[in-house]
Image (cartoon, rainbow, N blue to C red):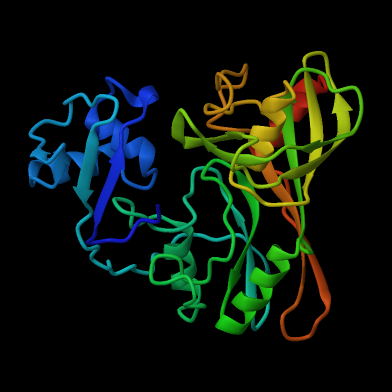
Amino acid sequence: MEEKTGELFLFTVTPEQDGVRVDKCIANAYDRVSRSYISKIIADGGVTINSEVVKKPKTAVHEDDEVSFILPPAEAPEIKPENIPLSILYEDQDVIVVNKPKGMVVHPAPGHYSGTLVNAILYHCSDLSGINGVLRPGIVHRIDRDTTGSLIICKNDNAHRSLAAQLKDHSITRRYRAIVNGRISEDGIVDAPIGRNPKDRKKMSVVQQGGKRAVTHYHVLEQFQNHTYVECELETGRTHQIRVHMAKIGHPIVGDDVYSSGKSPWHTEGQTLHAMTLGFTQPTTGEYVEVNAPLPEYFEKILNGLRGKG
């Protein structure tokens, strides 16, 4: 069901959800609603089980219960420009390509309206595409918070429409670098559909029913005793695609705390994944542009350690 603010949402508890806390059950069913926000809705009397108002977030639901809640109308926040340093790899009249650092969220979201890439971009360039609304001006694609590297921002609606079309027909070049656990002996392709994990709606997984086609090409760059340095090229662009696919074949990305244990000898903060190469057709001139983001320092340090150089 598509979420619409200010409207009633109703669902029936499945056997798998029997005995689960009502706040967790709703959060799993509607992944963009946090449990803390659901607690506030409960405090305001906005959640019912079988037409009875829920008073506590820890109240358990049971199979076949009818759960309803009202998502209050969203207040459009003011997204302010912030003087945050940017590493700009390419810029013209239509687009900006930046090298996003680790730990930076791409765009504001409820409860997180500052310190994002959008805040930084608005300081650098106040005129951005408005197609994705006030929270995501100029944003046509995203990379995860702890993934570094190339990200394109659109300055106007024409550029946004052009880049969105290129993403849809898979004509944009996107090559990533990753350090994965275990030794991979040869290049390969993972062709496995990705969708929401049925047991945890905040995670993605390979799912045969309802999943969208996802294809990742991986190329072995260097082999080490217990790790492999690989290049992954996206044929499609699903949420967490490389992370899910590499974990699926038994070689999760080093430091990934969602699709593996997250533990690594280097105490990394999140996955060791870098969006190195981004190639696209310039919206106005029609020329092909390819941009490369240098590996971050922490990534180079790990590679040098694996090579015995540090």
Residue 73 falls left or right of residue 122: left
Between 249 and 273, the one nearer to me in the picture: 249
Count how many numbered circles sit on residues in the image: 0
In this view, the residue farthest toward the front is: 64
Between 213 and 35, the one nearer to me in the picture: 213
Residue at image point 47% right, 77% down: 130
Residue at image point 46% right, 28% down: 199
Between 15 and 154, the one nearer to me in the picture: 15
Q: Is residue 302 visible?
A: no
**Residue 252: quarter of image:** top right
Residue at image point 23% right, 38% down: 66
Q: Is residue 68 visible?
A: yes
In this view, the residue farthest toward the right is: 186
Relative to residue 63, is residue 104 depicted above or below?
A: below
Residue at image point 37% right, 23% down: 15
Residue 33 falls left or right of residue 41: right
Query: Percent from the top left, x then y, of residue 145?
Result: 51, 45
Query: Percent from the top left, x then y, of residue 228?
Result: 80, 25
Query: Percent from the top left, x then y, of residue 71?
Result: 23, 54
Q: Quadrant of the C terminus?
A: top right
Query: Percent from the top left, x then y, of residue 139?
Result: 53, 66
Residue 305 falls left or right of residue 259: right
Relative to residue 228, is residue 82 depicted above or below?
A: below
Residue 295 falls left or right of residue 26: right
In this view, the residue farthest toward the top is: 225
Between 106 and 306, the one nearer to me in the picture: 106
